[in-house]
Amino acid sequence: MMPSPALIIPSIINFKRFHRILLIFPLAISLLGCGLAPAIGQNTDSIPGEPMAPPSLELTATSLPVLTPEGNIPTMTPTFSTSPDSNLQKLIERAQEDLAQRLSVSVTQINLVEATEVIWPDSSLGCPNPATSQLQVLTPGYLIRLHASDRIFEYHTNKNNLVIYCDNPSLLPSESLPDK
């Protein structure tokens, strides 16, 4: 004996309604939980409904490093931000060897002017190459300035083993330079 169609149709409708409720209920609970959690850094001390003060934007001026013209070299005494470690010494030697090869001169004709610890704004180490893309990650390293043939040459390094001759260096961010 088959049940009458009048009994089957309401049970199908109730079954669909039951499934909708099963789907909507967890979704509603999830959304409710998202709305109640305070955002990271949000002030939870204020009274609900009380207007919050707008964040203040305070701009501070920072000075850019002053580059000396190539002809005006005050001293030829090497300056180090800290005492040179063995890794920095190896990076300086690699830069001197590279410059000696570029200029076809002896390494003894190349003098160290400066070796300063810096933080480069990206993986290009302050020597952007338009043909390649750079990782936007702060990269600790060194700025090495060498003197040869009456000119100053810049080499940029990371802390490991990468030494780059920088023919057209970008300006260094002032916060990456040591306090003098």
Image (cartoon, rainbow, N blue to C red):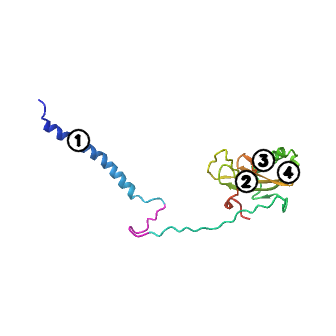
| Image coordinates for residue 19, horizontal then vertical, percent | 27, 43
Which numbered mark, 2 or 4, is in the foreground of this view? 2
Q: Quadrant of the C terminus?
A: bottom right
Q: Which residues are magenta?
A: 41-51
Among numbered discs 3 and 4, the one appearing first in the sequence: 3
| Image coordinates for residue 118, horizontal then vertical, percent | 70, 56
Residue depicted at x 23% and y 41%: 15
Badge 2 marks a residue whose secondary structure is loop
- Residue that carries the numbered disc 2 in the rendered image: 169
Which numbered mark, 1 or 3, is in the foreground of this view? 1
Say few, some or many: other residues with alpha carbon within 10 Å of mark 3 (under 14 / 14 to 19 / 20 or more): some
Q: CA distance from mark 2 to mark 4?
A: 20 Å
Q: What amino acid is at disc 2? A: Pro
Q: What amino acid is at disc 1? A: Phe
Instruction: Give yes or no for contact between labels 1 and 3 (Cβ–Cβ under 8 Å).
Output: no
Say few, some or many: other residues with alpha carbon within 10 Å of mark 2 (under 14 / 14 to 19 / 20 or more): some
- Residue that carries the numbered disc 1 in the rendered image: 15
Q: Is residue 5 left or right of residue 147?
A: left
